Image: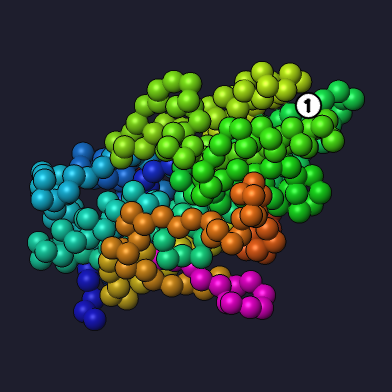
Amino acid sequence: MSKLIGNAVFGQSGGPTSVINASAAGVFTEALKQTGVINKVYGAAHGIVGILNEIFYDMGQEDPAELELLKTTPSSALGSCRYKLADLEDDETDYKRLLDVFKKYDIRYFFYNGGNDSMDTCNKISKYLQQSGYECRVMGVPKTIDNDLFGTDHCPGFASAAKYIATTIMEVYLDARVYDTGMITVIEIMGRHAGWLAASAALAAHKGYGPDLIYLPEIDFDLETMLTDVKRIYEKEKKVIIAVSEGVQTKDGKFIPELVGTVATDAFGHKQLGGTASVLADYLKEKIGCKVRGIELSLMQRCAAHLASQTDVDESFLAGQTAVRCAVDGMTDFMVGFQRPESGPYQCDIKLIPLNEVANTESMVPREWINAEGNFVNQKFIEYALPLIQGESKIAIEDGLPRFARLKKVRVKLD
Ligand code: F6P
């Protein structure tokens, strides 16, 4: 494989995670080491949008200590986007523009960090560059708290969100039991189409402080079935905790907030979720009459860097670092993925998955990991998730508060 010399660009896309910047740290530190192959390392502001608008930061001018702090800094440090590239047959405008920008900045390495929609973008760009005859190595770097990327055992970002969700539910469990009166608590967990995150509430149950019921998008949601489940537990215990995915839908395809109003959609046609806990809490209050609290974990579950899994931080960094190493070695058109041995102790091994296989295919919680009633997950999920949440990330502290990375973000200006 011939040596490809040029510049590299890295962009972040889609919803952030508490460890997404660990992948950025992996890409930047590795790319900056590739002297003689990668000349300049650029960060694109707001992913593909920054490339289209030529807003690049020169990562070589950042203090290495700040790049190190990215490992424990949540949210997308370069800014993210939800920008959908049109299909090439329908509109070539963005593709032509991207190619012009790649040529102008001599970009020969493109690393895109995101979930399903972002891997679709990455795949489209990769194929367009290939058919244009422009030599550029393209690698997807996985990320999504939803854990639904195809072909990989798990996704960077999932484990830290799972650890936060399980820990928070354990704490809420204690609080929700202090009074001698009845109480129902509905906890809403992210996950647009897949129930991996909601299932992680079972990790709290595994420790004896978990929900009584878990509802996942993999199973059609029915209000009356939930009411029957809740009544059964309430009559016996006077306390019920429900973990519900924001992504649950009725059998005619309605998200819960759509039962009481209309919801907006984004560029990818995804409904703006959130509000499920509050709708269900109102419903249960009316039907059962006791005190009901609806708690939406919302953004906290994906930006809680103080509770990140060290395994997740390390693997996120590894994903970024591997993408660069593979590209420099001649690989292109893949997403970095993970696999683990079928038996024995947990170990994270790398695999490469063709981008066209990843794009737009979602991975769901297997039906056999969900109980027959469709309102909890079994031991298989616990065995899957427990190794991923191991280890406590040590965040830097200044004046008693987190010290996040402060990037200079020096804009690239071509002469
Ligand atoms: O990236 C996945 C995700 O965090 C989903 O869990 C959630 O439904 C969605 O993003 C929220 O999107 P946004 O940040 O655009 O509101």
The colour scheme used here is: rainbow
Q: Secondary structure at mark 1?
A: strand
Which residue is painted at 22% across and 55% down in the image?
A: 124
* Relative height, residue 127 to residue 274 (above, below): below
Quarter of the image holding residue 328?
Answer: bottom left
* Relative height, residue 268 to residue 316 (above, below): above
Q: Residue 381 at what x, y percent from top left?
A: 64, 59
Amino acid type, label 1 = Met
56 in the magenta segment? no
Q: Nearer the viewer, residue 108 or 284?
A: 284
Viewer can see residue 412: no
Q: Nearer the viewer, residue 252 or 322?
A: 252
Label 1 neighbour load within 10 Å: few <14, some 14-19, many 20+: many
Count of number-bearing discs? 1
Which residue is painted at 49% across and 37% down in the image?
A: 250
Q: Nearer the viewer, residue 45 or 213?
A: 213
Which residue is painted at 46% across and 46% down in the image?
A: 193
Viewer can see residue 174: yes
Q: Residue 13 at what x, y percent from top left?
A: 36, 45
Residue 303 located left or right of residue 140: right
Quarter of the image holding residue 165?
Answer: top right
Q: Residue furthest right?
A: 180
Magenta range is 336-347
Q: Is the CB–ligand 1 distance for label 1 below 8 Å?
A: no
Which residue is painted at 22% across and 71% down in the image?
A: 4
Q: Residue 63 at what x, y percent from top left?
A: 46, 49
* Relative height, residue 273 to residue 100 (above, below): above
Badge 1 is on which residue? 183
Residue 143 located left or right of residue 242: left
